[in-house]
Image (tube, rainbow, N blue to C red):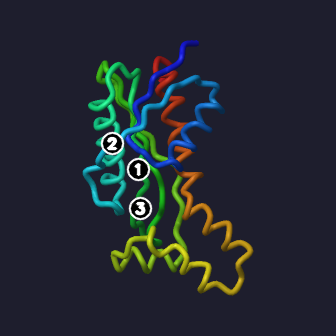
């Protein structure tokens, strides 16, 4: 299999690391071309639609900056309020030169009350992550929750894996 050329609409080392891990797990040889790409949505998207649009816009932005790519990827993490409160998730969009596009959403995770309150007040979570553990008496299981919210790894990897499998096997779907 030849090496795939992927334009990636992010310069986030964290997101690029997760993408490399997913590609390795899928046994896909790829050369990544990360570029800064605007999401066109709020920095903290608070609906599934905004989050998906952010991923699509980042994939389009990457494709516009890198020529001769096999496809481009956009990654966006966001939140959506359901009856029980805000859930966290990730959308990934993949687009290629033929116009073929897919989007895939990760699983969702209901955020603890501390984060619910921040989102209700429109406070940016990324600047207030430390408060969750500081206000906690029992840190054992809360450290795990803090880690997945802080690093977003399970959401990003899940959406990337789903999107890449669907894209690479598109004739099967």
User: Could you say whether the residue bearing mark 1 is in a helix, strand or loop?
Assistant: strand
| Residue 76, numbered circle | 1
Q: Helix, strand, or loop for circle 3?
A: strand
Circle number at residue 58: 2
Q: Is residue 37 above or below residue 66?
A: below
Q: Are marks 2 and 3 in contact (CB under 8 Å)?
A: no
Horizontal and vertical percent for residue 40? 25, 51
User: Dot 3 surroundings within 10 Å: few (below 14), some, or many (20 or more)?
Assistant: many
Place residue 148 in its image quadrant.
bottom right
Q: Indicate which label's residue lies in the foreground, 1 or 3.
A: 1
x 45%, y 23%: residue: 5
Query: Is 136 on the left or on the right of 156, as rendered?
Result: right
Q: Position of residue 67 (x, y in %)?
A: 32, 23
Viewport quadrant of the N terminus: top right
**Could you tell me which secondary element the residue under label 2 belongs to?**
helix
Residue at point 51%, 56% (across, down): 108
| Mark 2: few/some/many CA within 10 Å (<14, 14-19, 20+) | many
Q: Give how far across and how far down residue 170 sits, in percent.
A: 46, 22
Identify the residue position indicated by label 3 in the image: 79
């Amino acid at each position: 299999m030849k090496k795939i050329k992927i334009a990636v609409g992010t310069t986030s080392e964290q997101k690029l690391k997760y993408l490399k891990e997913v590609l390795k797990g899928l046994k896909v040889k790829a050369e990544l071309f990360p570029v800064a790409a605007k999401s066109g949505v709020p920095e903290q998207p608070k609906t599934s639609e905004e989050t998906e649009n952010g991923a699509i816009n980042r994939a389009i932005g990457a494709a516009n900056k890198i020529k001769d790519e096999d496809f481009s990827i956009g990654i966006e993490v966001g939140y959506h309020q359901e009856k029980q409160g805000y859930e966290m998730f990730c959308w990934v969009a993949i687009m290629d030169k033929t116009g073929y596009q897919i989007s895939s959403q990760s699983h969702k995770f209901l955020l603890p009350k501390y984060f619910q309150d921040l989102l209700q007040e429109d406070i940016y979570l990324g600047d207030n992550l430390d408060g969750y553990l500081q206000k906690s008496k029992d840190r054992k299981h809360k450290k795990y929750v803090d880690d997945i919210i802080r690093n977003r790894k399970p959401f990003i990897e899940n959406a990337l894996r789903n999107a890449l499998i669907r894209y690479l096997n598109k004739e099967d779907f």
